């Protein structure tokens, strides 16, 4: 059985597993689905790229 919550913007009842309110289109803040698939992996890869490039610029550029 799906639970329903009230939309923070329009106040109408929506299922708690929807990403957007079907009535007003606002983002739902009650999602139970968690992170989007692959979001954490993409964040870690981006973080490593930034860290490695920062080290390169700090150590190998002329002073």
Image (cartoon, rainbow, N blue to C red):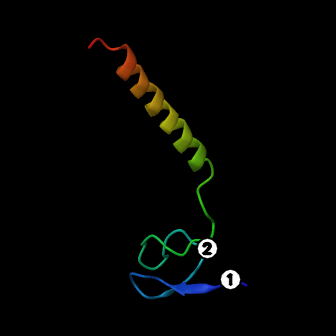
Report the front residue among 42 and 3.
42
| 20 to 53, vertically: above or below | below
Q: Position of residue 59 (x, y in %)?
A: 39, 18
Q: Quadrant of the N terminus?
A: bottom right
Q: Which mark is residue 60?
A: none
User: Going 42% across and 25% down the picture, which residue do you hit?
Assistant: 55
Q: As drawn, is 40 to the left or to the right of 56?
A: right
| 58 to 14, vertically: above or below | above
User: Going 62% across and 71% down the picture, which residue do you hit?
Assistant: 32
Please count the marks in the image: 2
Q: Position of residue 42 (x, y in %)?
A: 55, 42
Q: Quadrant of residue 25?
A: bottom left
Report the front residue among 18 and 49.
49
User: Going 38% across and 81% down the picture, which residue do you hit?
Assistant: 9
- Residue matched to label 1: 2
Q: Secondary structure at mark 1?
A: loop
Question: Dots 1 and 2: beta carbons under 8 Å?
Answer: yes
Q: Position of residue 45 (x, y in %)?
A: 55, 36
Label 2 neighbour load within 10 Å: few <14, some 14-19, many 20+: some
Q: Residue furthest left?
A: 63
- Residue matched to label 2: 17
Q: Position of residue 29 (x, y in %)?
A: 49, 73
Label 1 neighbour load within 10 Å: few <14, some 14-19, many 20+: few
Report the front residue among 25 and 48.
48
Q: Quadrant of the C terminus?
A: top left
């Amino acid at each position: 059985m799906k639970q329903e919550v009230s939309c923070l913007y329009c106040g109408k009842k929506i299922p708690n597993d929807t990403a957007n309110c079907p009535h007003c289109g606002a983002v739902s803040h009650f999602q139970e689905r968690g992170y989007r698939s692959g979001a954490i992996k993409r964040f870690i890869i981006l973080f490593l790229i930034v860290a490695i490039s920062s080290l390169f610029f700090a150590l190998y550029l002329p002073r």
